Image: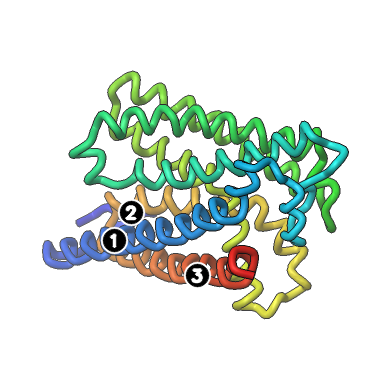
Amino acid sequence: MNKTLTGVAVAGGPGVETAARGALKRAAAFWFLTAVAGQWLFVYYIAGFYGPTLVTGHFENWSRNTRLIDGYIASDPVGNLFFAAHVGLAALLTFGGTLQLVPQIRKRAIAFHRWNGRVFLIVAIAAAIGGLYLQWVRGTALHGKGTGAVEAAATTLDAALIFAFTGLAWRAARRKDIAAHRRWATRLFLVVNGVWFVRIGFRAWMLLTGGVFGGQPFFSFWSYGAYLLPLAVYELYLRSQTAAASAKFAIAAGLVVLTLIMGLGAVTTFVVAWRPLLFG
């Protein structure tokens, strides 16, 4: 085998290549299963905490979440509706998005995959528009502590990527370029879940570092890293598939480490931040 990530030739026998491909495949499966489990915890939290208020209209109950910035504002009914819609769309995106990545559904229920995909693309755009409204019109990030404008700009960049990847995934599907469609759809899945990555990444950082710097400088940085890092890792994963065995093993090992951190962050976020609101 002569291909590597850097173009430098590295020898490797068929057995080593097979093992490397297997390691990469298992690492990707480990990431996917961990992400699905963590995101379904997120859906469970949204349904359990926000679901009853969305049905009854008692948005004032959001005030129980003291970490929430500009959740319920009595003098802003339009903003409250936007927030309610944004939360509902987030649950729909998270649940529907994970189903899009299940290979068995793509193979055995292609009609469902296509219709769920169309819904996912439309909801992704709607959620991005809602996020921009909340950040810049309602001013949610600007009302928070720290560098709110920086975090609002991070949301804006994330929304721009959502718009771009939605269009590219749709165009590839129309052209019946399935390979390209899956790549763009996966990139869309990653940026759509930026809010989830923000939360679990921040919790993992606080747990593993003991809250170095008080958390704020990291939070501002992670407002961008929450979707740019997953995108970068995905690009490395794609390149590693045609790289030498050594590169495949390296990417697989790195993916396992990142998955463990992701899982730790997801569990910690649920236990520390979400579970008390559901059962407190």
Q: Where does the N terminus fall, quadrant-wise?
A: bottom left
Q: Distance between the residues labelled 1 and 2?
A: 9 Å
- Do the residues under discs 1 and 2 have CB atoms within 8 angstroms? yes
Front residue (pair 185, 228): 185
Amino acid beneath label 3: Ile
Question: Which residue is found at the position 83% from the left and 36% from the top?
Answer: 76
Q: Which of marks 2 and 3 is in front?
A: 3
Mark 2 or mark 3, which has the lower sequence index?
2
Residue 227: horizontal and vertical position, in percent?
Answer: 56, 49
Q: In this view, does 124 lie to the left or right of 151?
A: left
Q: Could you classify mark 2 by the number of other residues whose Cα lies within 10 Å: few (under 14), some (14-19), or many (20 or more)?
A: many
Vertical placement of 180 versus 142: above or below? above
The residue where tag 1 is placed is: 24
Query: Where does the image place residue 163, in percent across and percent down from the top left?
Result: 56, 29
Q: How far apart are marks 1 and 3 (CA)?
A: 18 Å
Give me the disc on residue 240.
2
| Residue 101: quarter of image | top left
Left or right relative to 16: residue 73: right
Outermost top residue: 174
**Residue 131's spot in the image, x, y percent?**
67, 38
Residue identified by numbered label 3: 261
Q: Which residue is drawn at 77% across and 64% down?
A: 216
Residue extending furthest right? 75
Kindly give the residue lying farthest to the bottom in the view shown.
210
Looking at the rendering, which quadrant does residue 129 occupy? Answer: top right
Secondary structure at badge 1 equals helix
